[in-house]
Image (spheres, rainbow, N blue to C red):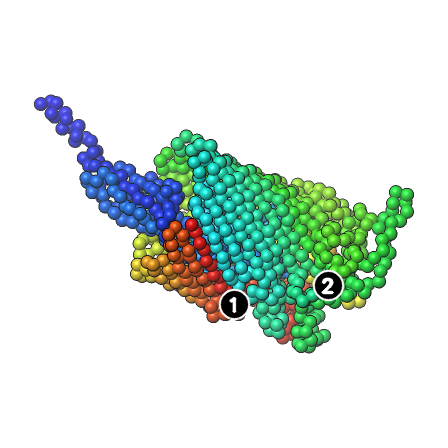
């Protein structure tokens, strides 16, 4: 009897779970092409133990109790899918079958556009010239629409520019040290191997592999075995920045002997697209080789590069556009029956990486990468010595100045290469002393000097990186990540003679200061093709960073915290001693070391209302050291540190409501960001004419320090399934991005040297000016039809608002209205008139219509796809994608007089949208 009672008591105390069979639930995740989708994240609403699909797309949950369940499957570049199912009492195994994830909108079209040609010009006064790189679609509708619809019109989510984004290859950041921006041309054309990032986090969201910034992180893992085993061939035809693209990719997968290979190559070429005189010929290559020693240890070599040769297009004043049309480009002219562009960018900076993958125990991974990048980035331009400006749109050549009629301007609207050669040829041959030999006899050279020449501004970087990533799962619901990075940069910067245009040599002399030598220590002031001229210096920088992050998953909450600290040392080493006496001791040799210490933290808290609805908070507070171009105000000549340069302080927060249902997927976010103590550097060429009419062209370095900005607004993205095959996809962004304080201003140029706040009479009055370079409000609504027979068609209507002109700080200072002769305001100055003359230009709102379509075919083992996308179907040419004020007029009488003209001499320079553009793509995969 006692034994019976004891047995009954034992069963009474056991958990209820022992009365029921526990069930294993499993499934396979595949793409539309029927191939496995690995590393898809599978979130089970009722569990803290989410899982990830393996290489064959398989996942499972074990020991599930009877009940109703909901799982959500997500993977970057695929549409997320939610599945509901029931587990009954007597099921031991439940098969959910094959779960098919659809490609994100536009993803399979391969339409990844990288077009940074507008950043090639130095005529602009701003670092805010439009630059776009559409990386890849994110996992929610807002990011998809931002990339593929609004991004085509220079829209930047939350107003954040390229400087605040991170792209990482195997732990190595691709941001440049000189300006902090990402140069997408380093891997342009490698769409096949960069189509699917290993990690893609948006905005402030903490990353597992780096601390990140404001604009999100895209992490690429180039492990050869991670690429799908297949051969892919593709051809594209477009009218954007090139005409043709051919691409081939081959991946072997992992062999039985432990080897995996992935190779990819492409070419983009063509001319006569839309903008006159623009052409391109670019190649790209990629190789990844992996050796697997065991299931726990592999080594992977990666090498990639993208030799690029591209002509640029000019910004122009409105007067020029009204005469010549929106396709006009002043940078080119005819030579021997062919178009020759003076502004050519030639860049080739290959990257080589060796990555070691090590699995430690059952829960830890250690990944180490060493990399080396070397190469050259050269940008050409015309240069002249004791001669007139050859630019056809030089203000004295415009009809408004009165020297030429409209017809005469049209007849001379392109660079006259023949005339440049002729003027060089007409120069009388001279004899020049360039030093003395060992016996003290003068060394003389005879020949014709160049009045005009073509020069290149060259940047040659040698960058070594070491990146280490360690992750471990401390508990089933607790993960820890540790990242360490070291970078050593040696950056050689100089100007090089590219073409003497028929002359024998050019002078390495400074026309602004009585023809003093740019390099006073070298008696030879004659330079020939390939020689350095005017400036030569080297940057060195050592950077160390440590990032620790942790993620803990609870039943209702998911918490991620990330901290970082970094230290950097920067130095300039000048190769030339300036012939200008006051700069002689600060131009040649090594400068003092500029060091900077950064730190910061991020947090993400997710509250799971249920399996479909979430509340997400992201917060970040961190500092950001100045870039090399911000530290040194004029590194071409001297080692002067920019007055007032400091680490930026960034404080950013956002709060989102997210729903991920089978019918409605939606994210509504409010964000608020402040950036304090930032430094804004603008470098541009200003025209100066001396007393006898000779045109001089000097590089002005304009710095604003102590700049404070605020970015605030709301975002909405949605994807609504109207029918099983028809989706409504849209986004809305309503933002206000503005300067919240006045700023200190300083300038440095060859003619006047350094000018600080004392000269400019105080700060620049820029408070409440708007941040330029992006529409501050943007709306998109689209429909997409996905046929069960593997074809799709979509269209979107896009509305862009509140695009502003980038301003010059100089005419916002008191110097603009205070007469330096009397220290009193100029006659006629009133606050109302000053406000009118310095008001920031706001461009008109614009409507754009896009469409895209595609179809895929399965023919045996071959898959073929065809797609086409068309932007700006209505051919709206009134949309200004970017522009800047010229920095020439800084005195009240000049500003007032110029502003009263129908066409001001120094009107803003603008870029307009290219109108209707298309991109067609066909691929074959097997």
Residue shown at 80% from the left, 58% from the top: 449
Report whether 446 appears left or right of 879: right
Residue closest to the eye, 687 or 898? 687
**455 up-or-down from 19: above or below:** below
Residue closest to the eye, 150 or 845? 150
Asked if residue 107 can be seen in this view, the reply is no
Report whether 795 appears left or right of 674: left
> Which one is in front in this view, the residue at disc 1 or the one at disc 2?
1
User: Between marks 1 and 2, how big is the CA–CA gap?
Assistant: 35 Å
Report whether 726 appears left or right of 125: left
Residue shown at 73% from the left, 51% from the top: 530
Image quadrant containing the N terminus: top left
Residue farthest front in this picture: 860
The quarter holding residue 431 reads bottom right
Image x and y of residue 770, in percent: 53, 61
Residue farthest top in this picture: 2
Residue shown at 27% from the left, 46% from the top: 96
Image x and y of residue 829, in percent: 65, 69
* N-term-proximal mark, 1 vs 2: 2
User: Do callouts 1 and 2 mark residues in contact (Cβ within 8 Å)?
Assistant: no
Image x and y of residue 354, in percent: 54, 38
Residue closest to the eye, 154 or 768? 154
Residue farthest left in this picture: 1
Q: Secondary structure at mark 1?
A: loop
Task: Report which residue position mark 2 lands on.
Answer: 688
Asked if residue 722 can be seen in this view, the reply is yes
Report whether 44 appears left or right of 440: left
Image x and y of residue 535, in percent: 72, 51
**76 up-or-down from 886: above or below:** above
Task: Report which residue position mark 1 lands on.
Answer: 915
Q: Secondary structure at mark 2?
A: strand
């Amino acid at each position: 009897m006692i034994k019976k009672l004891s047995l009954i008591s034992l069963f009474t105390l056991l958990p209820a779970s022992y009365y029921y069979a526990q069930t294993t639930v499993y499934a396979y995740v595949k793409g539309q092409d029927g191939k496995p989708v690995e590393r898809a994240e599978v979130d089970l609403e009722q569990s803290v133990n989410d899982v990830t699909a393996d290489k064959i797309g398989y996942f499972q949950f074990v020991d599930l109790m009877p009940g109703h369940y909901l799982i959500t499957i997500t993977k970057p570049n695929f549409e997320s899918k939610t599945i509901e199912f029931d587990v009954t009492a007597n099921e031991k195994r439940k098969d959910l079958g094959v779960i098919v994830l659809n490609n994100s909108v536009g993803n399979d079209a391969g339409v990844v556009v990288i077009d940074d040609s507008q950043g090639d010009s130095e005529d602009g006064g701003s670092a805010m010239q439009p630059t776009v790189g559409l990386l890849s679609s994110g996992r929610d509708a807002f990011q998809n629409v931002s990339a593929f619809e609004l991004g085509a019109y220079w829209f930047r989510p939350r107003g954040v520019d390229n400087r605040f984004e991170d792209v990482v290859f195997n732990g190595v950041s691709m941001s440049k040290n000189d300006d902090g921006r990402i140069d997408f041309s380093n891997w342009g054309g490698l769409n096949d191997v960069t189509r699917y990032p290993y990690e893609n986090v948006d905005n402030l969201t903490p990353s597992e592999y780096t601390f990140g910034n404001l604009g999100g992180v895209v992490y690429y893992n180039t492990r050869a075995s991670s690429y799908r085993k297949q051969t892919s061939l593709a051809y594209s035809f477009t009218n954007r920045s090139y005409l043709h693209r051919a691409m081939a990719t081959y991946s072997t997968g992992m062999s039985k002997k432990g080897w995996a290979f992935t190779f990819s190559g492409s070419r983009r070429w063509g001319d006569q697209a839309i903008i006159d005189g623009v052409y391109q010929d670019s190649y790209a290559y990629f190789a990844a080789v992996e050796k697997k020693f065991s299931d726990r240890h592999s080594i992977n070599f990666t090498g990639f590069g993208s030799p690029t040769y591209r002509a640029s297009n000019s910004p122009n004043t409105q007067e020029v556009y009204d005469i010549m049309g929106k396709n006009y480009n002043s940078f080119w002219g005819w030579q021997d029956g062919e178009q020759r562009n003076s502004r050519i960018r030639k860049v080739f900076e290959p990257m080589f990486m060796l990555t070691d993958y090590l699995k430690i125990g059952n829960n830890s991974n250690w990944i180490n990468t060493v990399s080396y990048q070397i190469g050259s980035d050269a940008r050409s331009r015309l240069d002249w010595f004791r001669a007139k400006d050859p630019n056809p749109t030089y203000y004295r050549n415009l009809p408004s100045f009165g020297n030429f009629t409209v017809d005469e301007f049209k007849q001379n609207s392109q660079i006259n290469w023949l005339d440049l050669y002729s003027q060089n040829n007409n120069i009388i041959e001279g004899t020049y002393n360039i030093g003395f030999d060992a016996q003290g006899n003068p060394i003389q050279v005879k020949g014709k000097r160049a009045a005009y020449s073509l020069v290149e501004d060259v940047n040659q970087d040698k960058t070594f990186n070491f990146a280490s990533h360690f992750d471990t799962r401390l508990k089933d619901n607790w993960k820890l990540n540790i990242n360490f990075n070291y970078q050593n940069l040696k950056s050689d910067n100089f100007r090089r003679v590219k073409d003497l245009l028929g002359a024998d040599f050019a002078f390495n002399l400074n026309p602004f200061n009585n023809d003093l030598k740019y390099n006073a220590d070298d008696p030879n002031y004659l330079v020939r093709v390939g020689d350095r001229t005017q400036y030569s210096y080297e940057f060195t920088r050592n950077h160390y960073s440590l990032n620790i992050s942790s993620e803990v998953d609870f039943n209702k909450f998911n918490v991620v915290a990330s901290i970082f600290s970094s230290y950097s040392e920067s130095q300039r080493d000048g190769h030339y001693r300036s012939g200008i006496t006051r700069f002689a001791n600060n131009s040649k040799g090594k400068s003092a070391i500029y060091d900077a210490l950064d730190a910061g933290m991020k947090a993400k808290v997710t509250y799971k209302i249920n399996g479909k609805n979430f509340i997400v908070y992201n917060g970040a507070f961190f500092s950001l050291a100045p870039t090399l171009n911000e530290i040194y105000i004029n590194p071409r000549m001297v080692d002067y540190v920019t007055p007032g340069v400091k680490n930026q302080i960034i404080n950013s927060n956002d709060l989102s409501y997210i729903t991920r249902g089978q019918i409605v997927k939606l994210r509504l976010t409010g964000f608020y960001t402040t950036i304090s103590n930032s430094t804004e550097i603008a470098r541009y060429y200003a025209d100066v004419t001396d007393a006898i009419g000779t045109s001089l062209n000097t590089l002005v370095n304009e710095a604003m320090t102590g700049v404070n900005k605020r970015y605030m607004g709301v975002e909405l993205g949605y994807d609504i399934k109207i029918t099983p095959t028809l989706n409504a996809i849209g986004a809305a962004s309503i933002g206000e991005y503005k300067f919240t304080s006045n700023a200190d201003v300083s300038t440095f140029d060859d003619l006047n040297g350094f000018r600080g706040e004392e000269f400019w009479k105080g700060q620049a009055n820029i408070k409440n000016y708007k941040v330029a370079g992006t529409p501050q409000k943007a709306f998109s609504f689209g429909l997409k039809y996905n046929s069960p027979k593997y074809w799709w068609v979509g269209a979107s209507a896009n509305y862009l608002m509140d695009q502003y002109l980038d301003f010059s700080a100089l005419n916002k200072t008191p110097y603009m209205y205070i007469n330096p002769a009397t220290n009193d305001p100029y006659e006629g100055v009133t606050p109302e008139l000053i406000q009118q003359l310095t008001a920031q230009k706001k461009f008109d709102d614009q409507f754009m219509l896009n469409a895209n379509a595609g179809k895929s075919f399965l023919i045996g083992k071959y898959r073929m796809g065809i797609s086409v996308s068309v932007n700006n179907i209505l051919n709206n040419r009134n949309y200004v994608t970017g522009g800047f004020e010229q920095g020439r007029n800084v005195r009240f009488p000049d500003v007032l007089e110029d502003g009263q003209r129908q066409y001001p001499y120094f009107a803003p320079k603008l870029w307009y949208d290219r109108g209707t553009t298309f991109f067609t793509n066909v691929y074959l995969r097997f």
